[in-house]
Image (spheres, rainbow, N blue to C red):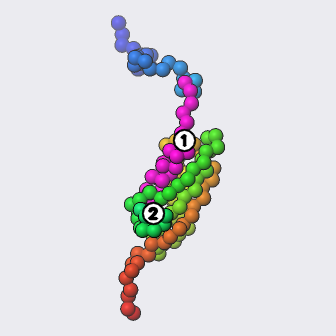
Amino acid sequence: MSAASPEQTPVPLARGAPTAPAEERGTTSFPAKVVARVAEQAATEVHGVGSDAGGLLGFGARRDFGARPSVEADLYGATAVLRLNVGVAFPVAIAPVLEQLRAHVTHRVQHLTGLSVGRMDVEVSWLHAAGAGVRVLL
């Protein structure tokens, strides 16, 4: 008996494995809150982007580059609409940082959820100066 080529050898299915094609097995859906969390994590991955952390009703909040920026998401079918509130390190060119933020968040949301990002509004609510609180006498 001759050995079969890999193309001709059927792969045994695991017990209970679905036999129907993926598109016939059903749908996967995400609540808007899950999409917002994915976008928050993606925003955290962009250098120079931070968030307000802690505090109550705006009091006692601190600027934190390790915290996730706040994101709100609305879903319209397979399209997500995102609203981000971020802080940015300063002095840097803000426009390129925001372009990188938009591109990275869009890519990660699309890759991880399969949803397209139809619109993304970004509010920069604070800037963090590199030498904040330090005065230099010239």
Left or right, 122 with respect to 15, comes to right
Whether the magenta-drawn stretch holds residue 97 is answered as no
Query: How many numbered discs sit on the rendered protein?
Result: 2
Which one is nearer the viewer's eye here, 79 or 60?
60
Mark 1 neighbour density, 10 Å: few (under 14) some (14–19) many (20 or more): few
Give the residue at x 39% y 93%.
Answer: 138
The residue most toward the bottom is 138
**Which residue occupies 61% across, 45% down?**
75
User: Residue 13 at x, y = what percent?
Assistant: 42, 18
- Nearest the viewer among 12 and 137 is 137
Q: Where is residue 76 in the image (x, y as percent from the top left)?
A: 64, 43
Label 1 element class: loop
Q: Which residue is farthest top? A: 1
- Whether residue 112 is situated above or below residue 65 in the rendered picture: above
Q: Is residue 138 above or below residue 51?
A: below
Task: Say which of marks 1 and 2 sits in front.
Answer: 2
Q: Earlier in the sequence, mark 1 or mark 2?
A: 1
Q: What stretch is highlighted in magenta?
A: 25-52
* Tag 1 near tag 2, CB within 8 Å: no
Residue 31's disc number: 1
Q: Residue at x 43, y 64 (%)?
A: 55
Point out residue 119 in the picture as x, y percentages from the top left corner: 63, 53
Residue tagged 2: 56
Residue nearer the viewer, 77 or 97: 77
The three-letter code of the residue at mark 2 reads Leu
51 is higher (above) or lower (below) than 79? below
Q: Which amino acid does label 1 sit on?
A: Pro
Q: Can residue 47 be seen in this view?
A: no
Q: What element carries label 2?
A: loop
In the image, residue 40 lies in the stretch drawn in magenta: yes
Q: Residue at x 54, y 39 (%)?
A: 30
Name the quadrant containing residue 67: bottom left
